[in-house]
Amino acid sequence: MKKLAVILIGLVVVLTGISLAPQFLIDQDHLRQRIMVAFQRQTGLELKMGETSFQLLPWPSFQATNVVLTRPGCTPFVAARSVHADMSLLAVLNREISFQEFTVKGAGIMLHRASEKQCSTWLPVFSQEDTATSPAADGTVSPRWKVSFGGLHLTDAELSWQDDLSDGHVPAGGHLHIKSLELAGMRSASPWVDLQGTHEHTPFTLRGRVGPLSQLFSARAEQKDPWAFSLGMTLGAGDHQDRVTLDGLMRDAHRLKGVNFTLSGRWASLRGMRHLFPHAVPADLGQIEGTVRFHSDDATLPAASSNGADMALTDSLLHLPGRLVPDQIHAHLGSVDLPAGAWHVAAPLQLSDIQIDADSAQAPLVLQGQAAWGRYAWLFHGELASLQQARMAAFGRDPSSVGLNLDVQGQDRTLNSLFNRNDAGKNDVAQEHVSFALQGNVGRQSSTLTFSGQASLLQLPDMKGISGLLVHDGHVKGQLVMNAPGTDGPVSVTVQDMAFDSREFGGTLTADFPAPLGSGMSGKLHLTHMDGDHFTYAPVMELAAEGAHPEEKQASPASNGQKEDRSATDRYMGSQYAGAHGAATDEHMAPSVPDASVQKSLPVQWFGAVATSAFDVDVTADQLHVAGVAYQGLHLHLLGLEGRLSLSVLGGNVQDVPLSGEVVLDGSSDPVRMGMKASPLILPAGWVQMALNQPVTFEGPVQLNGALGTEGAQQDALWQALDGQMGLSLVDGRVHREVLAPLAGPAASLLKMGSGTMGLRCFAGTVKFDHGQAHFNDMALEVKHFSVIGQGTMKLDDMSYTLQLMPHVSLVGADFSTPLVLSGQNGAFHVGTQDKDQPALDTASFGSDACAYAVQQARGGQKGLALPARDEGHSGGAGGILRALGLGGN
C-alpha cells in the first residue's frame, strides 16, 4: 500500500508539474507573437490577443482574452471577450490544428461588403483553395496547416451586417443578438445546429441537422452525395409563436446548385421579415400559413460560379432568393397591406383572406380573397395560366406575359346604411350588384386586358369632380393596354374602345395616359347623354360642409330650417367650392401677402399637376343637361402643353343659339396670362357666380358675349389687371329674394316674404374692366311687375361699389319709381337717395321694355336665348298688389 501511495503521489506531482510547466518554461508573450505571425501568414488576416494561456492536462487547451480579427489596414470585423479551445495533440503531428471544442464568449461579428474590396468581410474571409502562403522574411515558404473543429459554442454575441454595394436583393444593413449557438458533430456527416437569439426584442430559434460542413465551406470538397438539411425555426414566444420548417437537399452545397426544398409553417406576421428583407417582402403580410416547394434555377448563376471557379459562400446565399423557382404553392394569407404608391396603386390597398394554390409548375395559379381600396370592398377570384408562366412574367429575364382571368364582385352596401347619418358605416361606399371581369395577358413590360362590368348601384371613386357620385344601372366594357419601357420603368396606359352607359351618362372613350401616370392625357370622349340635374351623391360629400365654421352653418338656409331650392349638382359644387375656396371671398377684402416660402405658380396652386401636364382631349356630347342648361351637339377641346392650358368651345348650341368661345391660361412664363372669349358662351348661373367668388343667388342660363384678358404674378394682381368688356344676360331664370331687398326701396319688407326664390324675366348688363375698376352699364332686372335699371362702378382692389338704380313697380295701372344710390363693401350696403349734383340715370334709352334693351346691349347684337314675354296680367285690391310683387306665386 505504501508503494501504491508513493506511486500515486509521484504521479500527481508529475502531472501537476507537466500542467504547470508551460506557464513557467514557455515565454507566453513570445508564443503569442509567434501565433499571430503564423496566423497572418496562413490567412492574410491580422490577429490580436490580450492575455493567453496554454495547458496540457487534462488535455491540450488554449485560452485568450480580447481577441480581435481584422484585415490589414481595415477596421476589426471580429472581437471576442474570451476564446477557449480544446485541441488534439496527435493532430499537430500531421500539421493539423484540430479543435475538439471551440468556445467564444461576448463576440461582436461584423459582415461588411465595402466599396474597398480589400476591407470586405463577407465570409469566407479567405480563399478556400489550398495555395501556398506568402514567403517569410527569410524567404522560406511553409505549407498551410489544416484547421478543423469538432464543436463550436458561441454565447452572448452580436451579429451585424452592412452592404455598401447592395443590388436590391438584400438589405443594406441590420443586426441581431445571438444568445447561444451550438454546432455539434461538425466533422460528422450530419452536424446538429442549435441557435437562439433575438431580433428587435423578438426571440427566435433555429434547430436541426445539416449535411457535412466541409462540403458547404470548401470549394475543393467532393460533392458526391446530396447535401441534406432539415431545420425548424420559431419566432416569438407563447401561444402566438410562429413556426417554420425547411426540408431539402442540394447537389452542390458550396455553390448552392441543385437546391430543392419544401418550406411549410405558420407566421402571424411578416413585418419583422419585411424589415429584415424589404425587397423580398415589399408589403406587410399578416398570418400566413401553408406549404411551398422550390428548386433553384442554376442557369441564372453568375458566370464565374457556372465555370466552376470559387464563389464566396455568402455571395451565393445572397443570390439564392433570386434563383428560386416555385414548384408548388398552397398558402393562405390573412392580410396584405400595400401602401400608397406600391405596385402603381395610388391609394392604400388591403387584401385579406387570400388563398393561393398551384398543384405544380404547369398547373394554373389560383388566387382568391377579399380586397379593400379606400372605402371600397370587393371579393376577387383570379386565375393565371400556370405557375411557371406567372413566375416568368413577373421575374423572368426576357419579356413575357401570362394569361389572366379575374372576376371581381363588390360587397353590397344597403341604402339604409348609406343614408343613415348616424350609422357607423356611413363612410363605406354605396354599391349593389357590382361585378367586373378582366381577361387577357399581363407582364412586366406589356399587358393587354379586356374588361367589362356592371352595377345596379355604384359610387364612383374619390376623384375631384366625381367623388361620391352614384351611378345606377351602369355597364362598361373596353380594352386596357399597359406598357413599360423597362422592368422597373414607369407605366403608360391606353384605354381603347371603352363604352359605358347608365341612367346618368353614357358614351365612349379612347385615351392614352403616357408614363409616368399623371403626366398627361390624350384622347377622345363622346357622351351620348349626360343628365347632371339628376346626379345624386352619397352623404359622404356633406363631410366637407360639416367642417365649416359654426357661424357659417348658422347663416346657411338649411340651418335656419329653410329648404334650399337647388339641384343636386349645385349643392355638390357648392360643397366642393366651400371646401376648396372657403376663404376666397376674404382674399378680396384685403390684399393677400405672398408667402415667400411657396414657390408654386398660380396655375399649379389652382389645378395642381394638371397645370404642367400635357393634355389633348377632344370632348363631344350629343345631349348634356347640367344645372338647368340643356346643351346639344357640344364640342370641346382641352389642350395643355408646358404650362399653357386652353379650353375651346368648337361647337354646340343651347336651344337654337350656337356656341363658340375659348378660355386660355398661360403659366409658361411670368407673369401669368389669362384670356377669355365668348361669342357667345352659355353657362349655368351658379358656375359664373362661384367663379367670381360670389354666393349663388341667381339660377338659370347666363349668356356671355365679349372678351377679357389679364396678367399678373399673384391672384390679386390678375383680378385688378382685368381688361376688356363682357356682356351678361340671364333670361327666364330665378332669383333669391334677399338680392331684391336692397333694390326694392319701400317694398323691401314685402319682398322678403314668401319662398326663397321667385321667377326672373331678365337680368342683363355690360361690364367693362379698365384700370382696376369695373364699370356697369345698361343694367336691367325684372321680376314680374318689379324692375330695376341702373349703372355704376366697382373698385377691384377693395370691392367697394356705387350703383345708381331706378326701381320701378307697376301696380294696378299705376307706376312707382324712386332714384336710389346703392353703395357697399364686404357684404355691408347702404341705400340712399341720389344727390342733386349727381348726373341722373338716362332712363329714356331703356325704352318701354328695359329687359329687351339691356339684353340686346349685353349680347352685342348676337343671337341669344329668347326673352320671355312680359307678364301683363293683374288685378286690383291688396291681393293683386301682392301677386304683382311675386308674393302670391312664382
Image (cartoon, rainbow, N blue to C red):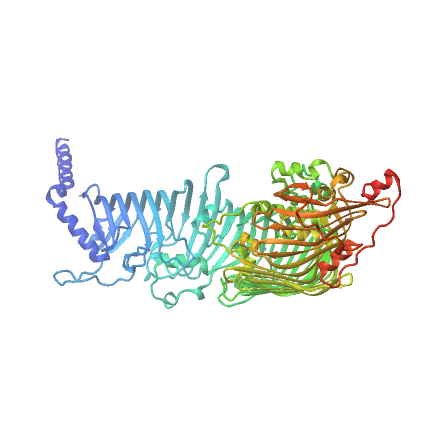
Q: Is residue 377 above or below residue 168?
A: above
Residue 888 visible in rendering: no
Residue in view at x 79 percent, y 54 percent: 849
In the rendered view, does 172 fall on the left or right side of 488? left
For the residue pair 452 and 101, the one nearer the viewer reads as: 452
Return the x and y of residue 647 as percentages of the image width and height: 63, 62
Residue 678 visible in rendering: yes
Q: Quadrant of the N terminus?
A: top left
Residue in view at x 20 percent, y 52 percent: 92
For the residue pair 62 and 65, the one nearer the viewer reads as: 65
Q: Is residue 551 above or below residue 375?
A: above
Q: Quadrant of residue 649?
A: bottom right
For the residue pair 520 and 370, the one nearer the viewer reads as: 520
Q: How many marks?
A: 0
In the rendered view, does 34 fall on the left or right side of 490? left
Toward the top, the furthest residue is 2
In the rendered view, does 492 fall on the left or right side of 761? left
Return the x and y of residue 354 as percentages of the image width and height: 59, 50
Q: Quadrant of the C terminus?
A: top right
For the residue pair 710 and 148, the one nearer the viewer reads as: 710
In the rendered view, does 336 fall on the left or right side of 54? right
Return the x and y of residue 358 as percentages of the image width and height: 58, 57
Return the x and y of residue 793 as percentages of the image width and height: 63, 51
Q: Quadrant of residue 223?
A: bottom left
